[in-house]
Amino acid sequence: MRDEKQETTATMPAPLLTERQAAERLGLQRATLEKWRVLGCGPEYLKLGRAVRYQPAALEEFIASRRRRSTSGYGTERDAA
C-alpha cells in the first residue's frame, strides 16, 4: 500500500518565494525587484491578489539569461556564433 501523502508531496511544485526571499536569493534589494517589475525587465513573478510571489525556477531562468562571456556588447555564446 502506497503512502498517499508521500506521493502528493513528491509531485508538488517548489514553494513560492516572497519578494524578500527572492531578493535575498538574487543578492539584491527589494526595491530593485520593485523597480524591475515596473520596467518589465526582472524575473517573472506571480501576482496573487496584492501579494507578489516568485517561483524558484523563474529566478534560475532569470539568472541563466544574464550569463555573459564578454564586457563588450551582449557577449553571450549565441552572439559569438
Image (spheres, rainbow, N blue to C red):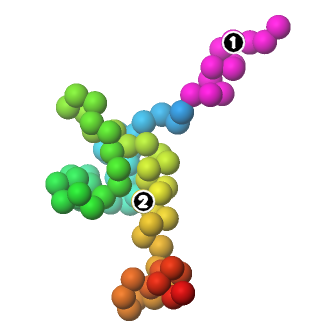
Sequence-wise first label, 1 or 2: 1
Q: Residue furthest top?
A: 1
Query: Where residue 20 sits in the image (x, y, percent)?
Result: 32, 45
- The reply to whether the magenta stretch includes residue 66 is no
Q: State whether residue 8 appears in this view.
A: yes
Residue that badge 2 annotates: 62
Q: Residue furthest front?
A: 81
Residue shown at 39% from the left, 83% from the top:
74
Q: Nearer the viewer, residue 65 or 16?
A: 65
Which quadrant of the rendered structure holds the N terminus?
Answer: top right
Q: Amino acid at mark 1?
A: Glu
Is 73 displayed left or right of 9 in the figure? Answer: left
- Across and down, in percent, residue 65 comes to 45, 66
The circle on residue 4 is 1
Q: Residue at x 44, y 50 (%)?
A: 58
**Distance from the alpha carbon under mark 1 to that under mark 2:** 34 Å
- The magenta-colored residue range is 1-12
